[in-house]
Amino acid sequence: MRQKSMRVLVLAVILLVGVAGTAHAVTFTDIDGNPHKEAIEEMARLGILEGVGDNRFAPDMELNRAAAAKVAAFLLGYTEEDALEAEEWAPMFDDVYPGMGQHEWALGWINLIAADEVIIGLGDGNYGPGNPLRMVDWVTILTRILQHEEAQMTWPDDYNEMAADLGLDAGLPYEGMNIVDRAEMARMTTTAIFDIERPDGRRIIDIVVFDVDERDPDDHGEEDDVVIYDAIRFSFSAQRTLLPAGGGQTTEITVKLTDGEGRPAANTQVGFFAGIETSDDVIDRSGQLSTREVISDSNGIARVMYTTLAADDDQSIAIMANAPQGDDWTEQRFSILASDTASLVQGRLINPFTGAAHEGADISFDAKDNNSHMMHEGATQIGGLYSLPVLPGDYHVSFHLDFGSTAHYSGEFHGSHSQLNRDNTATMRETVSIAENQTITLHSERGVLMGMVTNIGSDRNLYITRDTGETVIAEVNDDGRFMILIRGGTYTIGTRTGAIIKSGVNVTPGVVTDLGSFAR
């Protein structure tokens, strides 16, 4: 990165102070009624956990070993600076190294906790950053951090007993081998921070200084040099994605920026624009923004307010943000909607080959009864989650995936509900009927089904029917290969005439099911 001097607009700062709040003052919209709500909010206040976008925490999402490393390091008193230094260490695991891919942001954190032997490898030279943790795994980590691990303890029984002895299972339906979710992790961790003494009589809260933001709201700070990063990533969220019609409604738009290493992109210039796309033109709505330029804070956060007009009703309002990137600019956009009839369409998108969250994917909606087309660019946020406001109607929904530099297949494959392209991109399709004022969850987590047909014949189609009744078609290539992206379930493969070729085929989201060679 490099820096250049640029005067921060005082007006922009003044406008934002009243709406931005502190870095940790987040009200999550999906934790009301959750038994661990207070623990979640405390973890956010301490700066240990963040939401997943759109003011959601995703309490039911599983905890993986990459995220666990960062939380564990915080509990040991390590800082972002420590993690940056640890990134330069020699690789400690075969699957944790610079350029490792999706979980590279956790490289330094993993090195730190591995060096302290708080989280160890899988025994095969790998760490498994994307692997989920079980309850007993997290108890084991907390037991080590609290210095209560004893020699000759056997796993998992002694650690399950330790959970009860220390009280780490307080308020939980504890089952050691169950996958631990983010809410359960928050509950166990707050118990460990505040309630459990180490052998020396001190608690974690007595030792570790957490990043609790206690800034004076009247302190606007000093003018800083604006930073230009070589790579910038955007993550959008909104206080309200779907607003009532009639005008005069406000929502806070938050953009979180990270650099190419997944670290906060602080002190960079962010420009905001707003508009409504019609079939003929783009109607500028930037005047409805509280400001047009913001400097991201130390956490890479930039915020603005949008106020609706009555003319915005039932129009998809695109909020666009751009930031300097190297010698150019990069941009991303996010959609909000003012309507009394629209619904929210939500779900999670994963890489069908690996199960990893697929972030930054475009999602488009094409109405079946007219030519309207609505594209949500970069719709999937942290964790692959998306939540989109959509007007009632019948739609063809397309998920546009880009696998980047990782080649999961060669060639090109077509089917009724998916297409895998030679350029390492793919499209998944489904239809959905959206009524008024609903929250609809789409089944967008898919797996891969592939194989080789030895006697192709004149009909190149395979009819693949799920045990619930729906059928998808896979086209067989000239060389006999086929590949489709498909929902999890049990399937029967047959021909157009109804002849069954294979039955009892099980497909799991995020997993490749290869049937090998078989005759038609």
Image (cartoon, helix red, strand yellow):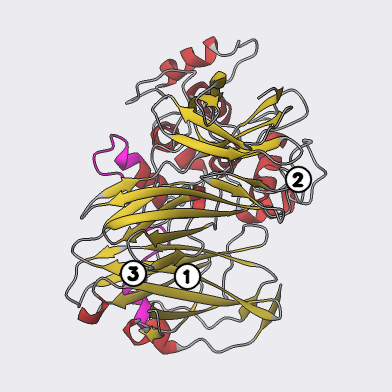
Horizontally, residue 107 falls left or right of residue 156, namely right
The residue indicated by pointer 3 is 252
Mark 1 touches mark 2? (CB < 8 Å)? no
- Count the marks: 3
Q: Nearer the viewer, residue 119 or 262?
A: 262
Horizontally, residue 106 falls left or right of residue 44, namely right
Mark 1 or 2: the one toward you: 2
Q: Which of disc 1 and disc 3 is earlier in sequence? A: 3
The residue indicated by pointer 1 is 333
The residue indicated by pointer 2 is 410
Span colored in magenta: 15-39
Q: Secondary structure at mark 2?
A: loop
Do we see residue 240 in this rendering?
no
Main SS category, magenta section: loop
Answer few, some or many: residues within 10 Å of disc 1's Cα (few below 14, many 20 plus, some between 14 and 19): many
CA separation in Å, label 3 and label 1: 15 Å
Q: Quadrant of the N terminus?
A: bottom right
Q: Amino acid at mark 3?
A: Glu
Answer few, some or many: residues within 10 Å of disc 2's Cα (few below 14, many 20 plus, some between 14 and 19): few
Res. 254 image quadrant = bottom left
Query: Residue at point 45% right, 65% down?
Result: 375
Query: Residue at point 47% right, 88% down?
Result: 9
Mark 2 touches mark 3? (CB < 8 Å)? no
Task: Answer whether residue 268 is magenta in the image.
Answer: no
Q: Nearer the viewer, residue 87 or 228?
A: 228
The answer to whether 89 is drawn above or below residue 5 in the figure is: above
The answer to whether 358 is drawn above or below residue 200 in the figure is: below
CA separation in Å, label 2 and label 3: 44 Å
In the rendered image, the residue lying farthest to the right is: 90
